[in-house]
Image (cartoon, helix red, strand yellow):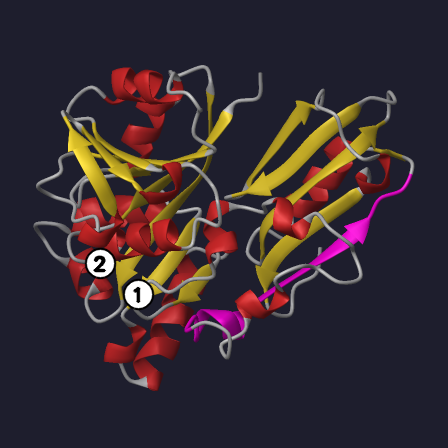
Amino acid sequence: MARVPAILIGGYLGAGKTTLVNHLLRHAAGRRIAVLVNDFGEVSIDADLILGAEGGVLSLGGGCVCCSFGSDLVGTLAEVLRRQPAPDLVLIETSGVGIPSAVARAASLVPDLRLEATVVVADAPNVRARAADRYVGDTVQQQLEDADLLLLNKTDRVEATTLAALQAWWAADHPRTPLWPTVRAQVPVEAVLGLGEKLQGEADSPPDAGAFSPQARPFAPAAEVFEFGSLWLNGRVDVQALTAEWSTRAATLVRAKGIVEDLQGGLVSVQWAGRQAHIEPWTAPIDPSKVGRVAWIGLRGSSA
């Protein structure tokens, strides 16, 4: 049985984590998403997304759920994964003063879960000051260090020169971690939720391409630095060499996913997410014409 992918969402108080979660839920595109939060009192799922509540579970539209885990993350994760039908994806929102890597260590104890990435949301007007603050600086800095992907949010509240300085500051200290400027956490959802089946169609005409256009949805300015595409890897593939090559492009290659034939002739799922490679045997039925196609998402100007 394939493990369920999970994504951590971290960041300091007021950065926009819950805004991001609500945005992802609104654009789930049929995915059954389970959202885990420390406490419902800390997180405001938009009321129009909630169908009902029972105990520590909110029932959301589209088969999604939101669960409060308190101090028992492992137990709540295990319970969520036993739900029928099982979720397609788990989002874990950390506390505003929580350390994502600590949450990741706890979540890694759940065998049926695969941690894909940590997305940290930062408040553009305040992140540098908070990182230097004598009281909360250590917490903020550790949150930033834990990021596989950084969403620099509220960029509409800073001048262009300040935004450029923030981008340079981040690139100097974290050269291998992508940064996306966002307003109201309006990031293209596939960049966070991963490459779904919608990008597994014809290579010369990826479906839903308009979804990544500022004219189609209000994703700018993130869409201005975001691009996607695909490549074909025909025949047997040295998967280790492939993922090693991807690791050299960690600052620009955000996501990649495909089913390929490895050197032994077996089919494997190979994914890149959050500076990490995930390689697993593929045993489910698949159209042979799709074997060898790798879809990718990266910062504009990158290539897979």
Is there CB contact under 8 Å for labels 1 and 2? yes
Task: Residue 228 in the image: state x and y as whole percent.
Answer: 64, 61
Question: Can I make out residue 18 in this image?
Answer: yes
Residue receiving disc 2: 15
**Helix, strand or loop for disc 1:** strand
Q: Does the magenta stretch include residue 226?
A: yes
Question: Any mark on residue 153, and which?
Answer: 1
Task: Determine crowd level at label 1: few under 14, some 14-19, many 20+ residues with C-alpha closer than 10 A.
Answer: many
The residue shown at (47%, 41%) is 31
Asked if residue 92 lies left or right of residue 213, the reply is left
**Helix, strand or loop for disc 2:** loop
Give whichever of 255, 189 is nearer the camera: 189
Task: Residue 97 in the image: state x and y as whole percent.
Answer: 15, 43
Q: Is residue 290 magenta?
A: no
Question: Farthest front residue?
Answer: 51
Q: In the rendered structure, which amino acid carries the disc numbered 1?
A: Asn
The residue shown at (43%, 75%) is 221
Range covered by the magenta-colored residues:
218-234
Asked if residue 255 lies left or right of residue 54, the reply is right
Task: Residue 15 in the image: state x and y as whole percent.
Answer: 22, 58
